Amino acid sequence: MIEQPPNIVDVQVGTFSMGGRENDKFVGRAELPRREIEITAKFGLGIIPVTEAEYEKFDREREAVSTGLPVVNVSWHDATAYCEWLSAETGKRFRLPTEVEWEYAARAGTDYIFQHGDTLSLEDACFLYDESGDRVGPGARVPGGSHRSNAFGLSDMIGNVGEWTASAWTESLASDALTDSSRQVVRGGAWDYMPRLLRISWRDGLAPETRRDNLGFRVLCEGADL
């Protein structure tokens, strides 16, 4: 058994508006139509993305470069395998969040474009360029929890590293949207992006075997109360 699983915060049930806002000039078809969603079961979510040190306990051949940095260069298959391992180690049911659960947690009861408002600052997220294309950020990952948390106590939901979700890609958010099971949804944006790609409603789809230096994941624990 592992000594310390990832730190988890309980996310309670509720409703929210999923998708892009009408006054957000960067919203695309993949972020629409906006829909009211009800979350009917509480869950626990990692306060920060899984770190290199946490992942090293699962993959002993992979040496952590830094204990606090979020792990990257992990595929969707790697992330899913980690969740299965963590479930076996703890006796709790861990998995990747769906993109609905991810967005609900990221919004944390708000309806902003970003986590804390309709504009983004380096106090709130790790990103590289501003909307003019000027470099403003550190140009690398930073330790998890370096930015202020949202109302649910979650940090780095946007920026730093993009996050795999459990959801297969859909062409839009319509209930009857065509599903592309060859891609998995990624949320949150990353350290080398500009703000338009860190909007809470932003979504992308990548092949599950993809590994990148700006792509990690966060774990969900069903039922929570850890």
Image (cartoon, grey):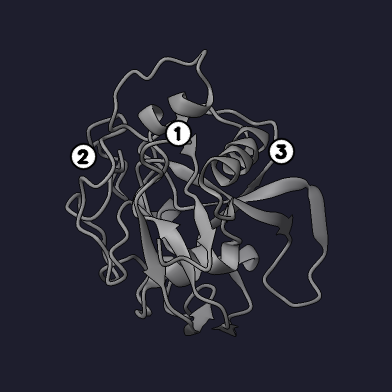
Residue 192 or residue 169, whichever sits in front = 169
In x, y percent, where is residue 103? Answer: 49, 67
Residue 27 appearing in the image: no
Q: Secondary structure at mark 1?
A: loop
Residue under label 1: 214
User: Whole-percent x and y of residue 162?
Assistant: 47, 44
Question: Comparing marks 1 and 2, which lies closer to the viewer?
Answer: 1
For mark 1, does the 10 Å Cα neighbourhood hold few (<14), some (14 to 19), or many (20 or more) residues?
A: many
Q: SS at mark 2?
A: loop
Callout 1 amino acid:
Asn
Q: Which residue is mark 2?
A: 136
**Which of the two residues, 89 or 180, is positioned nearer the viewer here?**
89
* Mark pair 1, 3: CA separation: 15 Å
| Circle 3 residues within 10 Å: few <14, some 14–19, many ≥20 | some
Q: Quadrant of residue 110?
A: bottom left
In the image, residue 98 sits, relative to residue 50, either above or below, namely below
Kindly identify which residue carries mark 3: 207
Asked whether, in this view, residue 172 is left or right of residue 100, the answer is right
Q: Nearer the viewer, residue 210 or 154?
A: 154
Asked whether 32 or 126 is in front, the reply is: 126
Which circle's residue, 1 or 3, is located before the other in the chain? 3
Residue shown at 73%/61% (left/top)?
170
